[in-house]
């Protein structure tokens, strides 16, 4: 227990230092999550050895990952996913997955890599949870570019999670697909009681609202219960907890279709104040700098493959998108490039898929370190390039972070 507190102390120091250091960079061009990752490398077992990921820290890490995906799922509007732009994003992601599978199959013929399916899934992911604070800081969430990134990002997280469950599950693909369907049905059933609870005259809703501003904090506790319950349900079906966390976010949005400013403030404090920094710092602690330095070509190749497999199709999809009424082009080349760069930003899914592959003995820890480092590079470079392409922020519709309306998660 003592070592857990020592590790948590160093993680907390990194969590406090990261936003301060990020604030020193002009225009906040270096995302805070990158600093958290680098700090994790420094204090981790492959660095100075000041902190380790034991069972206690590992639990906080899993909760941080869960909160990251819950907030990402909460941010997604179902109508956007099922609308015209959402369907286009889904087709684009399917093309990305097909391209990734074909590319890694060709590379595998040379004997240069293994765990082809895991690598393909990692290549076509988008770190929507990681992009949320970046888009928020840039005031892009309500802009056309931001909405497009949200659509592509939603499928860039949900698609790989389902692909992991179906293609990397302990059973066969057919058995895993049945498990995903059963999980989805049970998760959907959880939303049914809210139709009655949400009624203004509901006694239960009155009790929940009354307790939300007391030490009972009923709304926060219900959200945590929802998150943990969906993660447990995912584990029951032998699925990744990320799927459960993402589903919890969808359910929370369905329960609060108009949002809840006070609840979102509290969730932001819990998530970004403690749990999510723990996840990113511990992700950095898992990176072996020596293994990364020993395979620089592999690292560069992986980043280039992400740009080719994920960034290029999203760029082309955005470039070809037309207004259904006027048939005018919606995005110019620069904005399409920005959307493609944002979509090529990956990390949480890469961490999750490499962890699964290592646990299954399909990938070595050294190769996993290289892929996670590649994901960290995309978090640093892709949003940075997209921000620099923004010019004079012509599409900035949200106010700066310090003045932002808290109706959405930061």
Image: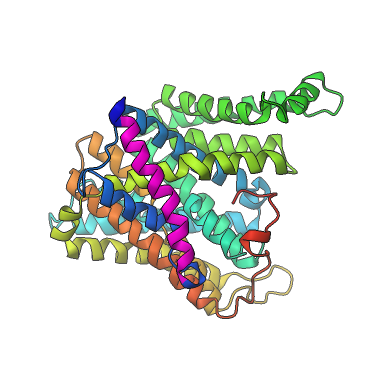
Left or right of 125, for residue 45: left
The x, y position of residue 171, in whole percent, is 32, 28
The quadrant where residue 218 appears: top right
Q: Is residue 115 left or right of residue 213?
A: left
Q: Position of residue 194 (x, y in %)?
A: 72, 27
Look at the picture and state if 386 lies above or below 218: below
Give the answer, above or below, for where 17 lies relative to 297. Answer: above
Quarter occupied by the N terminus? top left
Of residues 87 and 391, which is closer to you in this image?
A: 391
Q: Residue shown at 56%/61% (left/top)?
A: 135
Q: Nearer the viewer, residue 113 or 146?
A: 146
Q: Main secondary structure of the magenta part?
A: helix
380 relative position to 138: left or right: left
Residue 69 seen in the figure: no
- The one of 181 and 395 positioned closer to us in this rendering: 395
Residue 249, position as x, y percentages in the image = 58, 38
Q: Position of residue 410 (x, y in %)?
A: 59, 51
Q: Residue at x 68, y 64 (%)?
A: 399
Q: Is residue 9 magenta?
A: yes
Highlighted range, magenta? 4-25
User: Please, which residue is most extreme toward the right here?
Assistant: 201
Q: Quadrant of residue 146?
A: bottom right
Asked if residue 288 shows in the view, the reply is yes
Count of numbered labels shown in the rendering: 0
In magenta stretch: residue 288: no
In percent of the image, x 32 and y 31: which residue is there? 4
Question: Seen in the image, is 77 located left or right of residue 22?
Answer: right
User: Residue at point 48% right, 71% down?
Assistant: 386
């Amino acid at each position: 227990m003592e070592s857990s507190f020592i590790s948590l102390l160093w993680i907390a120091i990194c969590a406090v230092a990261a936003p301060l250091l990020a604030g020193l960079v002009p225009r906040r061009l270096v995302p805070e999550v990158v600093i958290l990752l680098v700090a994790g490398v420094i204090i981790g077992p492959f660095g100075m050895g000041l902190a380790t990921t034991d069972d206690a820290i590992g639990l906080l890490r899993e909760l941080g990952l869960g909160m990251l995906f819950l907030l990402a799922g909460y941010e997604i509007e179902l109508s956007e996913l099922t609308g015209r732009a959402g369907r286009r994003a889904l087709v684009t992601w399917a093309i990305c997955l097909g391209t990734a599978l074909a590319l890694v199959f060709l590379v595998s013929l040379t004997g240069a890599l293994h765990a082809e399916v895991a690598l393909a899934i990692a290549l076509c992911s988008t770190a929507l949870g990681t992009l949320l604070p970046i888009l928020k800081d840039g005031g892009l969430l309500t802009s056309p570019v931001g909405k497009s990134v949200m659509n592509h990002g939603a499928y860039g997280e949900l698609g790989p999670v389902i692909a992991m469950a179906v293609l990397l599950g302990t059973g066969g693909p057919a058995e895993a697909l049945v498990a995903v369907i059963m999980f989805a049905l049970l998760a959907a059933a959880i939303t049914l009681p809210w139709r009655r609870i949400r009624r203004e005259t509901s006694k239960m809703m009155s009790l929940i609202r009354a307790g939300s501003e007391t030490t009972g904090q009923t709304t926060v506790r219900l959200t945590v219960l929802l998150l943990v319950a969906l993660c447990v349900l995912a584990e029951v079906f032998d699925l990744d907890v990320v799927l459960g966390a993402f589903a919890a976010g969808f359910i929370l949005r369905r329960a609060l279709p108009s949002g809840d400013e006070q609840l979102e403030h509290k969730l932001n404090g819990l998530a970004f104040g403690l749990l999510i920094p723990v996840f990113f710092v511990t992700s950095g602690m898992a990176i072996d700098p020596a293994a990364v330095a020993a395979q620089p070509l592999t690292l560069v190749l992986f980043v280039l493959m992400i740009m080719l497999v994920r960034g290029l199709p999203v760029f082309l999809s955005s470039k070809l998108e037309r207004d259904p009424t006027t048939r005018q082009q919606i995005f110019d080349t620069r904005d399409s490039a920005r959307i493609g760069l944002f979509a090529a930003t990956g990390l949480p899914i890469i961490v999750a898929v490499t962890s699964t592959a290592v646990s299954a003995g399909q990938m070595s820890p050294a190769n996993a370190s290289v892929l996670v480092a590649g994901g960290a590079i995309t978090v640093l470079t892709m949003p940075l390039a997209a921000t620099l392409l923004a010019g004079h922020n012509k599409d900035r519709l949200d106010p700066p972070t310090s003045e932002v309306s808290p109706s959405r998660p930061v």
